Image (tube, rainbow, N blue to C red):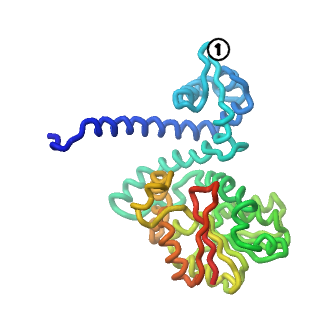
Amino acid sequence: MKDSNYNQQKAEQFSRSLVDVFNKSAIALALSLGHRCGIFATMSSLPASTSQEIADAASLNERYVREWLGTMVTGRVVNYFPETKTYKLPEEHAAFLTDDGEYNFASGMQFVPILAQIEDKLVECVRNGGGVPYSEYPRFHEVMASESSQTVVAALEPFILPLVPGLIEKLEGGIDVLDVGCGSGQAMLKLATLFPNSSFAGYDFSEEGIDRANSEAKELALPNVRFEVRDAAAIGETDSYDLITSFDAIHDQANPAGMLASIHQALRPTGVYLVQDIAGSSYLEKNFEQPAAPWLYTISLTHCMTVSLAYGGEGLGAMWGEEKAVEMMRAAGFANVSLHKLDHDFMNTYYIATK
């Protein structure tokens, strides 16, 4: 029996919004598939083409391409011309679906099927506690490296490094740099290429990530960079680096407080700790204006929080927030912590911390 305050119009409106969720979830999966199969890259250089012409150009099966195009057309991603039965990816859409554009959302959509694969294990964690370890996420490091190349690596020289006055000049002259939670090492590989007079190191808990980083460093023949498997909370070095960085790495650590203390110890007295992490507040009620808040809470639930809990960690989660981040950095011994935003990046906050 419905309550006397039941609003039928509001119920119907919510029901329609759930249909929209269904549709957008389907589009997300199809975007990921289109990226992995190279269809967007192929279509970006084609005129209006039939499904057979698109399939031939991408070396794919026409029947699958045609069904995929059904999702793209009804999802308003691809234009369709029924009189010629041809399809065209608008240039304005290609700018956000290919690597040559402003940002490749299709590449980022790969996280959706990757995270969905651990749902059965996550159900057990919701019921009984515990967490899902890194080893259960196939292709995660591969996709994370791709995401890092877009959000961090491409922005390093023009936007991120200038946040620290004089840092580029110091890197040109030669300083010691460490990236903690380096993943596949994309940031340090880029910096090692740009600044041959400086020395770079990357530490990460993941053997898979470090193997990828070392393999690429060898391919690039970079003598000024090294990568090691190490616990971020037990670096074991003192006054060793002029610059330490962490890109989207603190919140999913098992021991984030230990990581920050270990970094503080490894940093030289005049050094700088440069951090990029998810933009948001530690207070739920303040996150309504974060455009990607539902996605960030969900990726936290399905990865960031649970991998920390899998190792008996704190489980901060991606939305630990700026207030908690500053509190923990100061507790680790950083006397000065400043927050910065970049105009092009609504997803992240940048912290500069010094002793």
Disc 1 residue type? Answer: Thr
**Residue ID at (85%, 75%):** 173
| Residue farthest to the top, as pictured | 83
Q: Position of residue 321 (x, y in %)?
A: 49, 66
Camera-side residue of 213 and 280 = 280
Q: Is residue 65 above or below residue 135?
A: above
The answer to whether one can see residue 248 in this image is yes
Q: Position of residue 67 (x, y in %)?
A: 55, 26
Q: Position of residue 206 (x, y in %)?
A: 61, 65
Q: Is residue 72 above or below residue 158?
A: above
Q: Is residue 95 above or below residue 267?
A: above
**Residue ID at (67%, 70%):** 179
Is the N terminus in the top left, top right, bottom left or bottom right quadrant? top left
Q: Is residue 343 left or right of residue 214?
A: left
Residue bearing the label numbered 1: 84
Q: Position of residue 158 (x, y in %)?
A: 74, 60
Camera-side residue of 198 and 4 = 4
The answer to whether one can see residue 302 in this image is no
Q: Is residue 331 left or right of residue 149?
A: left
**Residue ID at (43%, 39%):** 21
Is the C terminus in the top left, top right, bottom left or bottom right quadrant? bottom right
* SS under mark 1: loop
Binning the other alpha carbons within 10 Å of mark 1 as few (below 14), some (14 to 19) or many (20 upward) gives few
Camera-side residue of 306 and 342 = 342
